Amino acid sequence: MNVFKNLKNDLPSSIVVFFVALPLCLGIALASGAPLFSGLIAGIVGGIVVGALSGSNIGVSGPAAGLAAIVLSSIGALGGYENFLVAVVLGGVIQLLFGVLRAGIIGYYFPSSVIKGMLTGIGIIIILKQIPHFFGYNAPPEGDFSFFQGGENTFSEIINTVKFISPGATLIAVIGLGILILWEKVLGKKAKIFKLVQGPLVAVAVGILFYVFTQDHQSLSISKDHLVSVPIPGDFSSFLGQFSFPNFAVIFQTDIWITAFTIALVASLETLLCVEATDKLDPDKHVTPTNRELLAQGTGNIISGMIGGLPITQVIVRSSANIQSGGKSKMSAIIHGFFLLISVILIPRLLNMIPLSVLASVLLLVGYKLAKPSLFKKMYAMGWKQSIPFTVTVLGIIFTDLLIGIGLGLMVGIVVILIKSYQNSHFLHIEDVSNGKHKVKMTLAEEVTFFNKGAILKELDQLPEDTYLTLDVRKTRYLDNDIIEILEDFSEKAKNKHIDIKLISERGEIENPDSYIQFFKLRPKSA
């Protein structure tokens, strides 16, 4: 396969992903209490190494916001960052084992409504978290997607923004947003040059020029707190000095292994959910091999941990930016990784002139495309079985964090399944009264489990005296022993209430069977 055949699409999209990834790599490292350079290492490894090994065409990997809290607590608990890196390496090894054991299938067991809720919730949280950056109030670091942060929360930070608006940062953010919208809605459709040179690149270039020309302006100048902050090494040796290495002397400590398993489990789950979500967003509808993805992520985490990087997962923010920018193959992720590597080596000072408010405008559009209002209307129209898990997932992500929100949505999704299973255990047909008897026909579903006990018991107990019950099990392929015992017990009640029972199966019809247990044990193809 020619990996360069889609370069005209992948190169522009890689630039957009680069500008989205750069502040997130730094922000997640800051939120994790790790060296800033560790976030860049994870972004580079996630792009180049994981991008090359992954089977995903449009997924992009990097440091994981969902692991920031775990990293922050683990660095202190394990006695330092070098000790923590051992857990990252071991976590990668465990992920490799997950891939070999074909654990990637887990991702397919999450309901579609929860996955859509995850995408929408992330879109909303991106918008909410970027508002302070857009106006030049940068209290929450980029990449901190949790609701609570240092005594504040997402909404209190937005309220605080009103008191600390930076005129210069806000002005260039509005200009940048205008450029992005103009590029997407108008110029991008006019000529090929506007597709090759992406709007975010132009917006960032204008942002740098704005910063340079307004440095000495009293009201429009942008302080360094509102700019990208890439570490600047004095020379090549000091650049190499930014790398950290694992302290394998602690490899046999129990806490190291507990942290490693935690990283492996959370990173694998976050990756599998992101894979499922990006496959839904992919306009070409490719299906990512999930076990291969776990192998790729495990390899990436081993390498990242060995040279001082944060844990890596596939990340929906970068991946969705890649899709929205027209990325077609894995080259987009790989090239963005090389952009990160080259830029932090050659042009760190230029990167440090980029206003965070301009990058916030890029992320605002990414968030809006993930959480379009039309999606809420669509999910509501699909009925409560889809809309309730969707809504719970969205609210859970906004008011807690990504994994808790998904967990809440999944729990509600399971409850919905149980309710539908309860309702669909049987079909009840009540016929006209004739010959002094009520005629009732109960047709059992194809699969009837212990979840259906309550529904069947309720219907049987409500049968009036002098009823003629026809029990049709011709379509039933699996009948739980709990249900058989219910029928067995009911046969005694039926005699007292003068209820006659006719059992219809593929073997024929039986009037008032003596033993349901014996009947279903002898019955072919059914339990």
Image (spheres, rainbow, N blue to C red):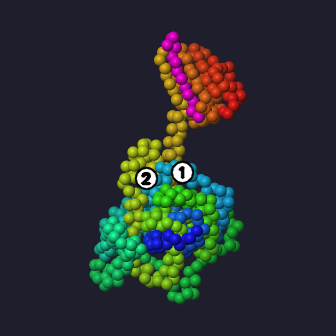
Q: Nearer the viewer, residue 152 or 228?
A: 228
Q: Which residues are magenta?
A: 434-446
Which image quadrant for residue 359?
bottom left
Q: Secondary structure at mark 1?
A: loop
Q: Residue furthest top?
A: 435
The quadrant of the rendering that contains the C terminus is top right
Going 57% across and 30% down the picture, which residue do you hit?
444
Question: Which label number is shown at residue 144?
Answer: none
Q: Is residue 318 visible?
A: no
Query: Which residue is tagged 1?
Result: 110
Which image quadrant for residue 522?
top right
Q: Nearer the viewer, mark 1 or mark 2?
A: 1
Q: Amino acid at mark 2?
A: Leu
**Height in image: 203 above or below 156?**
below
The quadrant of the rendering that contains the N terminus is bottom right
Q: Residues within 10 Å of mark 2 (few under 14, many from 20)?
A: many
Query: Which residue is tagged 2?
Result: 395
Is residue 438 inside the magenta stretch? yes
Going 58% across and 63% down the picture, which residue do you hit?
55
Q: Is residue 145 visible?
A: yes
Residue 21 horizontal/vertical position (percent): 47, 71
Going from the N terminus, do you reach mark 1 or mark 2 first?
1
Q: Residues within 10 Å of mark 1 (few under 14, many from 20)?
A: some
